[in-house]
Image (cartoon, coloured by chain):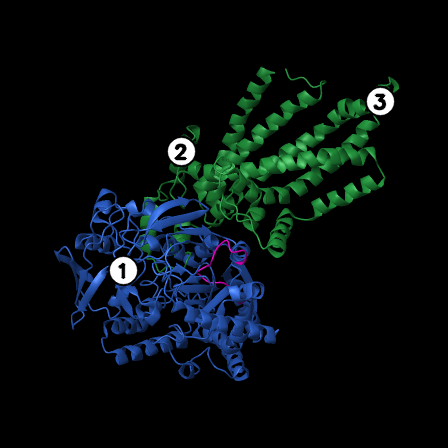
Chain colours: A blue, B green
Amino acid sequence: MLKKFGAVVLTAGAIAFAAGAANAQTPKRGGNLTFAISAETPHYDCHGSETYATLHFSAPFYSTLLQFDLAKFPQVKGDLAQSWTVAPDLMTYTFKLHPGVKFHDGTPLTSADVKATYDRMRNPPEKVVSPRKATFGDIASIETPDANTVIFKMKAVNAAMIEHFASPWNCIYAAKDLASDPNFPRTKVNGTGPFTFVEHVKGSHVSGKKNPDYFKKGLPYLDGFKGVFTLQAAAMLNAVQGGQVLGEFRGISPAERDRLVAAMGDKIRIEEQSWTLNLLVAFNTEKKPFDDVRVRKALLMAIDRWGGSKGLSRISTLREVGGVIRPGSPLATPPAELEKLPGYQRDMAKARAEAKKLLADAGVPNLKFVLWNRNLAMPYTPAGIFLVDQWRQIGVEVEHKQSDTAPYLAALNSGNYEVAVDFSNLFMDDSTLALAKYLSRDRSPQNLSRSTDRELDKLYDDHVRERDPKKRVALIRAFEKRVFEQAYQQPILWWHRIVPTHKVLMGWKMSPSHNLGADLAEVWLNQ
Amino acid sequence: MLRYVISRLLYTIPTLLGVAVLVFFMLRVVPGDIVEVKLRGDGGTVSQEVIEMERKRMGLDKPLLEQFGSWMVGVVTLNFGNSMWTERPVMEEIRLRLELSLQVAIMATIIAVFIAIPLGTMAALFRDTWIDYATRIITIGGLSIPSFWFGMLIMLSLLGFFNWLPPITFTPIYVDPVANLTQLIWPALAVGYRYCAVVARMIRSSLLEVLNEDYIRTARAKGVYEKLVISRHALRNALLPAITVIGLEFTFLIGGLVVTEQVFNLNGIGQLFVQSVSRNDFTLIQGMVMLIAAFYVFVNLAVDLLYAVFDPRIRYT
């Protein structure tokens, strides 16, 4: 089995290497790309969404001010912004826009459109949903001295602001559309992106055709695209194998990868990378005995992440051992440091003996509880089973309760649970986003431990305003240590992204987030 | 007859009203909130303020009776409101999928009926011969193998042997009949096999019973041709229970092909049902339950009327 797995990985690696060489070829123009989207967006509005399904649908139709340079991730590059400058005190950001950009309806894009877009996100009108309102809360004003210049003045320093300007969720809308109806982008499409909207057949597909007036000359290469909604993994895999779709850009499991490689050989390209997603275990600190740090810490210490990673990575999308920041990213805690924190020790016999002692000291040597989890097979079920087994080894009896997303969220948000498998979905390796989940409950509704820790809040605020990168890293480490020492919640494992594409599909770039690189501008077909 | 039909149609009003009340209030007992699923289901870090704003925007902050009242006003005028997930009219969401589901149901029924009637008849006429045994094996296979599993076998066979799969997106039959039939014949076969097995077994057992009736013996004693005895006297009566089964199966196919639709990636009512339940999209669920309830009521009425066509002893007054 191991041999077979190794062979598959080697094959995939060789294919990926060959693909890299092929990527250096001169792009060919024309053709229509059909790809799979594993979920269907409820609406078209990037600003009001938190699901990749919206981006895989809408990104080809829109531009953003900046975008992540996936070849040099996490560096950013201009999209609508031809150039930009940041004041030394990080309080002013000035963007010069590409001249001659037109919306798909022919309206010229000006700085007023950028202002209207960001105003909508930071100060949404009534009946407009803006999940990123807080992200842009540090913006004091937006000035538009001329049609091609936008100036953002800040209320306070946010060291990650430039990355936030590159967020894929910040689609630029036309000011006139927003003026006519603040919710125009929920149901209609009018962007400046590489493709113009053709149709959305509900439950079936979305399609677009090449934007002849796209401001990046020579792009896109494709004549058009069709994103087919394949909600079931089996149907999606069949479609990839049968050539009905040329790829799926979110990610598949190792077993699915192995099936495709075995069936398709050198026709399929597999790209792999650590993912900006993780599953966490969260303890409800408002419920006894989880209000006792000794109990929480004991449960974290019983988890063998290093061993679990080896086993789970064969059967699920879980793989990397990491702290609060994605392992392998610039701000991540190195493994040697991580091993010193509760829950990351390598000597499991010693850790579990200590865990048992902590439980006995806390007066709960025979602890029993219910672990809440989502009933999604990948990777929630294996993660839950893994936890149950790990805790069984210190004499803890756990009932694994899996439910649909709606009742799961209802239970978690009402605090009607003891321990839960939670998840964190980021689009970049920004610490302001990654750490926010661990803030006190009154500041972060997504903190499922429901803890209040002002020391953590202060560390967070200090790190957001800190401009010295070294001091910032130190504050992140201190924050992480505090979270794990108090054992409110902790990542179980980080996800591993595996993306299958047919070898004829070129120019698509792999990244640690499935929310990035969805505009298809540089994708082409080698046929 | 007309009076009977009118009275039956009038009975549908309290039936559907009861369904409407039940589905509306029972759904409100289900834990969960579509706004949470929408904004936090993918791990979004959305503030409680935004959640509350969205609830207000969708009218979920209004008293339950007020929500029920406005929905019922809509139902009476055949306006089921907007889907809470897509915010598009419920009727539009259903209409898009109904065309496909209806076509699969009709095709499966045609396949089932055209195979089941001769198969069941032959099995009954040649009872305990190799024909009967073969029919039993085929029908037991149809009953034992779930449709979705048969569908998966079909898909994997097409992929493995021909390296080909049917089109992945739906094309209406009036736009491109070839593309349409190329896509839908496979799910119709998958569900039609089980459907056929049920109907064939029903016809066999029913025909065996009828063949022992006195009026069949009388017909034979009068010297009526055996073919006429079978087709005019025996089969016609034996079809009555089969018609009931066909009616029930047809209605089931409209909304019950969840897994089969997933296997073939079909954009049908079954998938929509499951999605809307998992998202707590109450308005869409309500609309679909009403649709399927209406289907059951009208198909049952049609079945009852068909009884009179096949059995001259039945008269509705």
Indicate the amino acid at tag 1. Ala
User: What's drawn in magenta, residue-wise?
Assistant: A241-254
Q: Which mark is residue B69?
A: 2
Above-or-below relation of B67 to A69? above
As measured in the structure, the alpha-carbon distance from the residue carrying label 3 to the one carrying label 2 is: 58 Å
Q: Work out whether mark 3 precedes mark 2 in sequence or the reverse, and give the earlier one.
A: 2
Name the residue beneath numbered marker 3.
B214
Residue A150: tell me if it is visible. Answer: yes
Residue depth check, mark 3 versus mark 2: number of the one nearer the observer: 3
Where does the C terminus of chain A fall, quadrant-wise?
Answer: bottom left
> Could you say which quadrant of the image residue A293 lies in?
bottom left
Q: Nearer the viewer, residue A145 or B291?
A: A145
For disc 1, the marked residue is A134
Residue A492, horizontal then vertical, whole percent: 47, 71
Say what secondary structure mark 1 lies in.
Answer: loop
For label 2, the SS is: helix
For label 3, the crowd category at 10 Å Cα-Cα, with few meaning under 14, some 14 to 19 and many 20 or more, is: few
Q: Chain of mark 1?
A: A
Give whichever of A287, A326 is nearer the camera: A326
Q: Position of residue B202 (x, y in %)?
A: 73, 35
Residue A324: quarter of image:
bottom left
Marks 2 & 1, CB-CB < 8 Å contact: no
Q: Is residue A175 found left or right of A29 in the rendered image?
A: left
Residue at the extreme right: B221
Answer yes or no: is residue A42 visible. no
Q: What kind of secondary structure does the magenta stretch mostly adopt?
A: loop
Give the residue at the far left of this rendering: A145
Whether residues under marks 3 and 2 lie with C-beta atoms below 8 angstroms apart, the answer is no
